[in-house]
Image: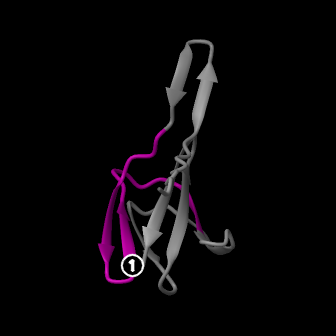
Amino acid sequence: MAVIRTLVTQQVTINTTGINENKLSFEIHKVQNNYKLLFNNAAQRHFQLYDAKGSLIQEDKKTNSEITIALPKSGVYLLHVVESNKSAVIKLFN
């Protein structure tokens, strides 16, 4: 029997009043080989797209409330998104 393990990454801030999980909130939609990320507001965001080997494929900073990420070819990718003190890591498939 094979065991499948999933690693979930999120940023957690610990301060004197307790623990605050800083999750980034957005909607994600797949359109052909592209993913659209829809945010509630326009803010400075830093994006990093990695392939399955961990190599950085794309890196960009944008302030739009709608961002399109184009995947170069078939495979599995990790998208790291950072907005001020919030972050998210998303697995993308093509």
Left or right of 8, for residue 14: right
Task: Tell me where the magenta segment starts and ends, as one range.
Answer: 23-49
> Can you name the residue that lies furthest to the right here?
55
Residue at x-position 47% and y-position 58%: 90
In the rendered image, the vertical position of residue 68 relative to residue 27, given as above or below: below
> Can you name the residue that lies furthest to the bottom here?
73
Element under disc 1: strand
In the rendered image, the vertical position of residue 46 relative to residue 70, given as above or below: above
- Measuring from the top left, give residue 89's x and y in whole percent: 52, 54
Is residue 7 something that shows in the picture? yes
Left or right of 90, for residue 16: right
- Measuring from the top left, give residue 28's x and y in whole percent: 34, 62
Residue at x-position 62% and y-position 23%: 14
- Measuring from the top left, give residue 1's x and y in whole percent: 47, 56
82 vs 52, nearest the viewer: 52
Residue occupied by mark 1: 34
Residue at x-position 50% and y-position 87%: 73
> Can you name the residue that lies furthest to the front here?
1
By what rule are the colours in the image chosen? Answer: one colour
Residue 35, quarter of the rendered image: bottom left
Left or right of 73, for residue 66: left
Is residue 45 something that shows in the picture? no
